[in-house]
Amino acid sequence: MSLENLIYFARNYPDSFHRLLHKADGERAEWEYPFAVAGVNVSYMLGQMLDYRRSSKARVGFAQLLEDDEMAFDNLFCLAFQMLDAQWLARRASYMEFNEVLKSTLGQLEQELTIGGVSSVQNLPSFRMLRR
């Protein structure tokens, strides 16, 4: 699934995808996160958010997005990956801090998914970070 998410990202948001792939933005640590591994972790994180055993407003918001948009998971993957990189840069993180940054990204994403009246991924506040 993660490979499909990465392919979707490359096709639909090529500018953002290439900037992340080539680590083009910001001042980077010597030990960066591996791109493909980060994609696997983002896909897994999103899958965990949909786990029916979790009762949270974010899960409900995410499920509602999926009802209205069959590409919501893929678009949310692209957004979450972009958010992960933005947090990575803001924290000046290194490889050993990857899990902390991933958890922080999850928190930010869950917060945005609980905003009332959001009918699509494109309406989430962080969506403007993605570039086609």
Image (tube, rainbow, N blue to C red):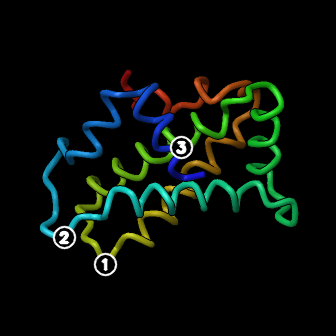
Which residue has dot 3 on it?
5
- Does residue 103 appear to the left or right of 84 in the view shown? right
Local secondary structure at mark 2: loop
- Residue 118, given in percent of the width and then of the height, sits at 71, 28
- Does residue 41 appear to the left or right of 21 in the view shown? right
Looking at the rendered structure, the kind of residue marked 3 is Asn
- Does residue 64 appear to the left or right of 120 in the view shown? right
Answer few, some or many: residues within 10 Å of disc 1's Cα (few below 14, many 20 plus, some between 14 and 19).
few
Which residue has dot 2 on it?
31
Residues 63 and 116: in front is 63
Residue at 19% in and 70% down: 31
Q: How far, Cα to Cα, is label 3 from label 2?
A: 24 Å
Q: Is residue 50 above or below residue 74?
A: below
Answer few, some or many: residues within 10 Å of disc 3's Cα (few below 14, many 20 plus, some between 14 and 19).
many
Cβ–Cβ below 8 Å for labels 3 and 2? no
Task: Return the mark for residue 22.
Answer: none
Q: Is residue 124 above or below residue 44?
A: above
For discs 3 and 1, the disc positioned in front in the rendered view? 3
Looking at the rendered structure, the kind of residue marked 2 is Trp
Residue at 34% in and 50% down: 85
Give the image quarter of residue 69: top right
Q: How far, Cα to Cα, is label 1 from label 2?
A: 8 Å
Local secondary structure at mark 1: helix
Cβ–Cβ below 8 Å for labels 1 and 2? yes
Q: How far, Cα to Cα, is label 3 from label 1?
A: 25 Å
- Residue 73, given in percent of the width and then of the height, sits at 65, 40
For discs 3 and 2, the disc positioned in front in the rendered view? 3
Looking at the rendered structure, the kind of residue marked 1 is Met
Which residue has dot 1 on it?
96
Residues 39 and 99: in front is 39
